[in-house]
Image (tube, rainbow, N blue to C red):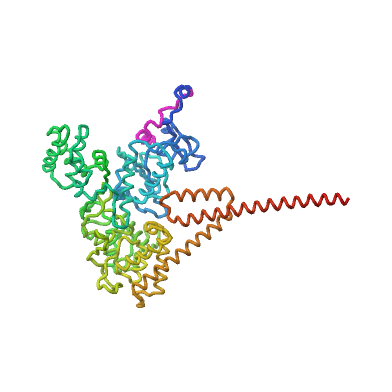
Amino acid sequence: NGGTRVMRNLAQQIYGSQLTEYSKKQTQKQKNGYSSRLGWVFVSKDFTKETTKAVRTYGSLFNVSKDYTYFTPNTFYRNDLRRLSTLRWVNAMSIDIDAKNGENEGMTLPDVQESITQAGLPMPSLIVQTPSKGFHVHWFLEQPKRASDKLNAHYSRIQTCMAEMIHGDVHAVGPERLFRLPTDENTVFHSQNRVSFDTLCEWFQLVQEQNQVVVHTYKKGFCKGYENLLKHPAVLKILEGVNKGQRDMACYTLALAYKAAGYDEKQAEQYLHNWNQKNTPQMRQIEVKRKVKSAYNGRFHAPSAKKIRELSGMLFSYVIWEEAKPREERTYSHIEEWEGDVLAFIRAQGGQVSGSQRDISDQITSSVDAEKKIPYATFKKVIARLEEQEILLKKVSGKGRGASTELTIIDEVKARRTQSEASKKENDHTSKINGFNSNTIKDTVVGGTALPLSTGSSLVLPQETLSPVVVPTYSTLSKPAPIPGNVPSAFVSALYNRSFLDGRFIFRAWGKIQLAFKAFGITYRSIAATDDYLRLAVDAVVVTVEKKGSMIAGDFQGDECFLKYLFGTMKGLFANYRSDQIRTFVEEIEGLGDIILSHVGMKLEEELKDARVVDRELVETKLAEIEREQSARQRRKHYHNHSAFELHSSLNQFKLFMKRDD
């Protein structure tokens, strides 16, 4: 059986000594006791409790693998309850990339691999393709981690971040979840690579630092780029010389540092011979030569941050800065560049093209290599993205092979902007953050590449402009700046489609939105990551345009007037939004039973403990409303009991009175 064969290869790699080969007899258990290292693996046919089974031996796991569909990479100390609270060992970090309901349509294994590379993540251990054409991606840990409340919470935070970075399901998180059992048929990638949990923690920390939208003020120990490696205090500490037991690793690490900094092999060897004189005792010269040769001929391009920390005893972390390869040298082109080519082709046909999708895709070639055609899967993905951005309208008539598709550009402003950005990416070879140990460009801000910031936090505006330029909105400047990439695209579109084309004006407008949200305790990242908040920001633009005019209508009343009104409007809209949230919440809890109401209160208290809570004031208000509701119910119960007691007493007095009369 394919599932059994693959499971035999993978089970030992995942579980190690957490499972036994065969069941222990009762006499063995009585003699040796129950092992606190063993764990239960859950398997299931369809996620329901009735079809879920727990196994604790490799024999049982292999036997059931042909009849079951899902398994837990992590193990539990109970065989009757698969819950976070019963987790014993964390063995793997696993991500579900869903392809249902139009999400990630047309995604292929190379797409998954590129997204992992772009995110700066290490190579996974296993990738399984699901029947819906999604993927389950697993990173097996070098050493299993004992589950705890603290570790489980951090695991979920890292897992959520990883899912966001590689287009995974951010709702399918938690170390207790089930994933599809690997078989010969569905295993599309398998390696012996393993990753330490500390490495994933470091990656998560670096991503958090990169996602700051202000000028980066990195934590102590951060090294920005290869060129600064040899100047960093941690590396300088190693260059002062090391003791016996550290020399080999220090020499190899420093050789990689010289390699990354641009020194050739001979230069590095000469510097390290000089460094060796500071060691106690010195290494043999032949050993120095071997370490340098190994570093320069090996697959590593830069030293390990972990090794630098261990050797120096100091804080150290860094991200790699490299140029992206020119498009013609890449085996997989960025989808944004294909978007520009697709739009150029449709525009050349008069803004509309029809025929079978495969025939249309066969006619589209790369703008930098006429011999290179767009892959059909990429073409479908591009069309879906352009539809989602409301740049392109797709109409399909007929079914099957006889179907005909009509593609029409419906928003020329957005289309030209998309094409301009794609063209800019092809021609721009400046260095950008690549993430952790990555060789592919990664955008570090919401919506694209941010406007670069100089040391003094003043805005440095690129010289390029978008084409065509219609009417500049910024009254004091004759030439509009490019659209800022660190502003969410929905907000940019709301202004851009009303002929607010200047990047500086859009940047200032978004600043007013941020200030309005800040008045309610909402952070920038929460605005960009919350659909309702972005919708409110767009609504604020619409209301402000109605009152203060726009360039396209010719009734624009000026920058300051517009921005001031936008700020006030945003505050008013959000205040109303929050009031509606509270009113709806109050109506909902009034219909809840006492036990469920108490449970909701506990969930809100847990939410407040999370540093990432989006609207802390709203959660606190909801908690206060629950306390009011609980107090009101207590008063009603007390009043009801008191009234019933008084009524009972009155009846007794009346009976006594009647008896006396008799």
For the point 43% across and 65% down, the residue is: 571
Whether 1 is drawn above or below 500: the answer is above
In the foreground, 601 or 102: 601
Q: Which residues are magenta?
A: 1-26
Front residue (pair 197, 341): 197
Where in the figure is residue 550, as x and y percent of width and height? 36, 74
Residue at the outermost bottom position: 554
Residue found 35% across the figure and 59% down from its top = 385
Residue 472's spot in the image, x, y percent? 29, 73
Image position of 331 (left or right of 275): right
Viewed as shown, does residue 654 lie left or right of 479?
Answer: right
Please state the horizontal and vertical placement of residue 257, each as a whole percent of the image.
19, 44
Does residue 590 sit above or below 539 in this rendering?
Answer: above
Q: Is residue 100 magenta?
A: no
Tell which of 474 and 298 is nearer to you: 474
Observer able to see residue 236: yes
* Residue 343: image location, x then y, percent: 29, 64
